[in-house]
Amino acid sequence: MDQSELIREIKDLKVARNAVIMAHYYQEPEIQDIADFVGDSLALAQKADGTPADIIVLAGVNFMAETAKILNPAKKTLLPDPEAGCSLADSCPASQFEAFVKAHPGYTVITYVNTTAAVKGLSDIACTSSNAVQIVESLPKDEKIIFGPDRNLGNYIKSLTHRDMLVWDGACHVHEEFSLEKILELKKTHPEAKLLAHPECPKPILIVADHIGSTAALLRFSKTDTAAEYIVATESGILHQMQKSSPDKRFIPAPPKDSTCACNDCRYMKLVTLQKIYDCLRNESNEVLLDEELRLKAEKPIRRMLEISSKLGLV
Ligand code: 13P
Ligand code: SF4
């Protein structure tokens, strides 16, 4: 099947199965373009919550599909490639995190949604990069906090909120690989370009960034800001929506340390293809299944996050 046939078939299957395709901004452009909804991790969780569809196809990675399933236990949630994991989630094994939490009684545990259901089950509140600062600030000032798993996001939040926070030492392979040196080199040939950085980037990059935010926040900024050029330090998939929204602006992917690798592509996000979406929809395969006891434990911190976000009007 060629691409246009595949797209037609996916659209027909979506109607026949009453399915919805939700895609993260880091997906390939052709996947973002066939999705019913494209968003960041927070928006995907909000959109998945109570969807009227019978089947959710999560064009993203495992923790996103798990989150959709946790919020919709009666619905079929399909992950087009079951190998689509997350290096950040992998950097926080549940058994080690449990020991860490147990060693620090009296701490409130906040975890980024980029975690397994088991780690969510050990947490009090979940957060995403769109709401992490507000979630932390919603707690009393003297509350002691464990934050995991991303050390860059955690330390960034700590620097903004000045809270008593213990930060887990995890990281994402994409954001860790950006090269400050090469970004500064690039700035020499594009002196007017603004640097947009995701808070999962290491501190030296955040220090020189003109704007820091989640993928949705960076996209919003790129639409309303008046610069003509931007260097974008997050996964390259976001450039598709930026370019679509602002066709006259130039978006340059921030260079990774190793110029021979495509390290600003998430190797897990990029496992998803149109063919795999078609196959899983047609066969209703690669369903995400969760033990009910674990699902219930993991649901609590996500519900708390959604409640706080909705109270604060965060979308
Ligand atoms: P957001 O979707 O919160 O911007 O996070 C980026 C990310 O790394 C998702 O895997
Ligand atoms: Fe995980 Fe990083 Fe890929 Fe996001 S970009 S899914 S944090 S590995």
Image: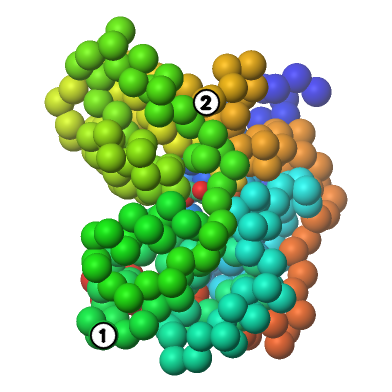
Residue 141 visible at all: yes
Q: In which quarter of the image is the C terminus?
A: bottom left
Q: Is residue 139 left or right of residue 120?
A: left
Q: Where is residue 23 in the image (x, y as percent from the top left)?
A: 55, 45
Q: Gap between marks 1 and 2, in whole Å?
A: 39 Å
Q: Is residue 218 left or right of residue 31?
A: left
Q: Residue at x 60, y 53 (%)?
A: 88
Q: In this view, does 267 lie to the left or right of 198?
A: right
Upstream in sequence: badge 1 or badge 2: 1
Residue toward you, 148 or 272: 148
Specify the amino acid type for callout 2.
Pro
Mark on residue 256? 2
Q: Which residue, given by chain and number where applicable, does mark 1 sit on? A: 142
Residue toward you, 218 or 94: 94
Mark on residue 45? none
For this orientation, the residue located farthest to the bottom is: 106
Disc 1 element: loop
Classify 63 as above or below 193. Answer: below
Residue 146 falls in which quadrant of the image? bottom left
